[in-house]
Amino acid sequence: MNGQVIIKVDIEEFIELRKTDKVIDVRSPREFESGCIPGAINIPILNNEERAIVGTAFRQNGREKAIEIALNIVEPKIQEFMDTVAKIDDNENLLVHCWRGGLRSERFSEYLSDNGYNVKVLVRGYKAYRNKVYDCFKLNWKLLILGGMTGSGKTDILKQLSERGHQTIDLEELACHKGSSFGALGQNTQPTTEQFQNDLWEAWKDYNISKPVILEDESQAIGSVRIPDDLYAQIRNSPVVAIEMGVEQRAERIAKEYTNFPDEQLRDGILRIRKRLGGLNAQNAIAALESKDYTEFVKIALQYYDKAYTFGLNKREPVQVHALPVKSGDHVLNAQLVDQFLQENNMNLWKA
């Protein structure tokens, strides 16, 4: 190797360096699509098919033969790799990783170094990053769960609390799903669970553990993604401030939103919960939809969602649940009430 010295860095240094240095993920496209470090650029040293060939060789003929086959595949593509890297803006300093910090990242870094780039390799690779994600949610966080029946404006309240300086996490925004049968309406395609958890950690990583983190009351599954087990266990055992808003206000709030979506999508949402809602209620909801009575449509759907929410809330320890009745649908005013509640009760909410 004729290039510059390749430096290996641990995950802590890597996280700091990526603020300025570009990250290259040399794993296969399939691995990258399952979950990646946000902002990383995928330049696979082996594509999906090539990785499968090398894996088969390793299992059948051992490590040395697998390496030989891999090099025969990779070396003719070195110039192609360098051409791709050359197109990256601000590419003088590069961070490289594979799955476990093995041969893939080492070889790619050698090629980069031979071509004059300053390169650092992440020790233990993407696996080190994933462990960082897991470890964060094993810590004992002071969580405040924002509860309330569907249509209480929890997401708007949460955003307002963020503007007021609180540490908040919008799980639904990260999941690209609002958690109900209608939760995918107007949303982008959901990430994988792995990517959702990575994005969650990125939103969370700079928070002060001595201060509360406020997030909505959610099921562990939000659409197709899942909240990490350790975090969800804390969510279920943390204090809840439950917004109490009348059904009329909630139905009107949701109905205004639903008029933006095709009726066929709303009908599909009702059909997905038909068994739990009841056949007659489902028929009545569809009839209301056909007559463009969106408020009535929502009220019928809320019969199921209110019941499900109450069931989940009742499974919590009563001492955890703090009711907060609100008279207005104004999320700014209601965020002020939550803020006031937090200030008045901060010392008592997380007593051991």
Image: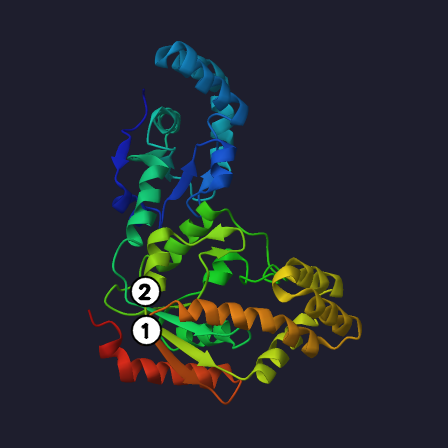
Please tell me whether mark 1 sits on a helix, a strand or a loop: helix
In percent of width and height, residue 71 lies at 43, 16
* Image: 181 above or below 292: above
Amino acid carrying label 1: it is Gln
Question: What residue do we see at 28% from left, 67% from top?
Answer: 142
Numbered badge on residue 320: 1
* Image: 217 above or below 18: below
Label 1: few (<14), some or many (≥20) within 10 Å? some
Question: What residue do we see at 36% from left, 52% from top?
Answer: 229
Residue extending furthest bottom?
A: 327
In percent of width and height, residue 248 lies at 60, 84
Numbered badge on residue 237: 2
Please tell me whether mark 2 sits on a helix, a strand or a loop: loop
Mark 2 and mark 1: Cα distance apart in space: 8 Å
In this rendering, position of residue 192 left or right of residue 205: right
Quarter of the image with the C terminus in it: bottom left
Question: What residue do we see at 28% from left, 49% from top?
Answer: 135
Amino acid carrying label 2: it is Asn
* Image: 176 above or below 245: above
Q: Are marks 2 and 1 in contact (CB under 8 Å)?
A: yes
Question: What residue do we see at 54% from left, 23% from top?
Answer: 49
Task: Specify which label sits upstream in the sequence, 2 or 1.
Answer: 2
Q: Nearer the viewer, residue 351 or 215?
A: 351
Residue extending furthest right?
A: 291
